[in-house]
Image: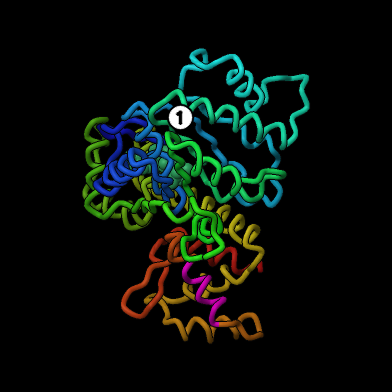
Amino acid sequence: MVVFSDRPVTKLENLFGRGHRKAVERLRAAVEEGYFAAVLGARRVGKTSVVKTLLNHYRYRFLYFDLSPFMGLRAVSLRSLVPAEIGFNESSLSSEAQLSLAVVSFRLKRMRITSEVFQSNLVTLLQELSRKFRRFVLVFDEAQVLPFIKGINYRGLLQLIHNNYHNISVILTGSMPGLLEKIISPANASMPGFARYIEEIKVPKWGREEAVEFLRQGMREKGIAHTEEELEAAYEELSGVPGFITYYGLLRTRGLNHEKALSKASEYAISQWERDLKAFTQVYSSHLYIHVLATLADTITGATWSEIMKELEKRIGRDVSKSTLHRIINNLLRAGMIQKKDHNYLITDRPLKRAVKKLAKTI
Ligand SMILES: Nc1ncnc2c1ncn2[C@@H]1O[C@H](COP(=O)(O)OP(=O)(O)O)[C@@H](O)[C@H]1O
Ligand SMILES: [Mg+2]
């Protein structure tokens, strides 16, 4: 069934697209093996939907931390780690573990919870969850926020789970892979052990046929008159990003005509990208990302590595090391913000291109 909603999908029958369903299956396999998994992809592509569908469809017991509201902040309070969802029966726990859950949920009003208190209670809780359940899933949605939470030794925590609690599988999602890499990069020899077994699962955008089919089905179900050209135009303009395509569909069902719905969805997409780009530059503390993107936004067919280098140095008026540009391009590729075609790098996402141009004027 096609649902036009602005909330994450939680049911498999509502999760549209081959790539998304495959991602659920791969995630399922990783969880069953007890691997840690990283679900990667651009914002609004459907990472949260994939994870929630997995948890719901296979009825896993889980604890869900939603860090997405804190993206782009460089200092995040401990309270951001309040579980957004508790996916198991609390009363089945021992009274000690119930107390620990109350502590990590900040329910004990009169208790001052320091990061030490929080961590030790979380560990007590996880210990019991791992003992009690054959498979338990711990989710950190938009996990690149973890390193910015004051007082939390997230690496130690993940390492502890990896070493001791074999029934607990950890799912990290992330749309800022450069940052997530700090947590999961297997290439870095100094990485803690858990990072060596992380299964990376990429959530793709919808292809043209999928996006058009999704809109066609949804509009038919709701009896909304439309033409194929309109649906194709929506795909083109919103570049196949499920979150924006869905929003267009939602607006059509609310009575907006094609032009109005598309321009509103497109504005929404641009503003969301602007917000993400700002968050990106804040946490990476570098405008170089915007400069590289701006270089590409000004082209139609993209630019080669050396063209980007030349243009970048011209823009900022100083030399840039090869390794710096390499890192930036790599992160942008993995964030799904740019693609590589033959020897050229380019931005294929139209709303992103517009957002970059707007933002580039301000830096
Ligand atoms: N496979 C899908 N099928 C149907 N709708 C989807 C799908 N993926 C994403 N969506 C829609 O797009 C929106 C954004 O998805 P979400 O899972 O929140 O993305 P992300 O976590 O990557 O930012 C959701 O509210 C949902 O309505
Ligand atoms: Mg999400």
Dot 1 beta carbon under 8 Å from ligand 2: no
In percent of width and height, residue 232 lies at: 26, 53
Q: Is residue 286 above or below residue 210?
A: below
Count of numbered badges drawn on the protein: 1
Q: Is residue 220 above or below residue 144?
A: above
Q: Residue at x 65, y 58 (%)?
A: 282
The stretch of residues the image draws in magenta is 322-330
In percent of width and height, residue 264 lies at: 45, 47
Q: Is residue 92 above or below residue 215?
A: above
Q: If the image is split into quadrants, where does the N terminus sit?
A: top left
Q: Residue at x 74, y 30 (%)?
A: 113
Taking 42 as reference, is 121 left or right?
A: right
Element type where label 1 sits in the image: strand
Q: Is residue 285 visible?
A: yes
Main SS of residues in magenta: helix
Q: Is residue 322 above or below residue 150?
A: below
Residue sitting nearer the eye, 112 or 116: 116
In percent of width and height, residue 48 lies at: 43, 40
As for residue 326 lying within the magenta part, the answer is yes
Q: Residue at x 49, y 48 (%)?
A: 268
Taking 227 as reference, is 176 left or right?
A: right
Color style of the picture: rainbow
Residue tagged 1 = 62
* Mark 1 Cα shell of 10 Å, populated few (<14), some (14-19), many (≥20): many
Q: Is residue 260 visible?
A: no
Residue sitting nearer the eye, 145 or 274: 145
Residue 290, picture quadrant: bottom right
Mark 1 residue type: Phe
In percent of width and height, residue 262 lies at: 39, 49
Q: Residue at x 50, y 75 (%)?
A: 326
As for residue 307 lying within the magenta part, the answer is no
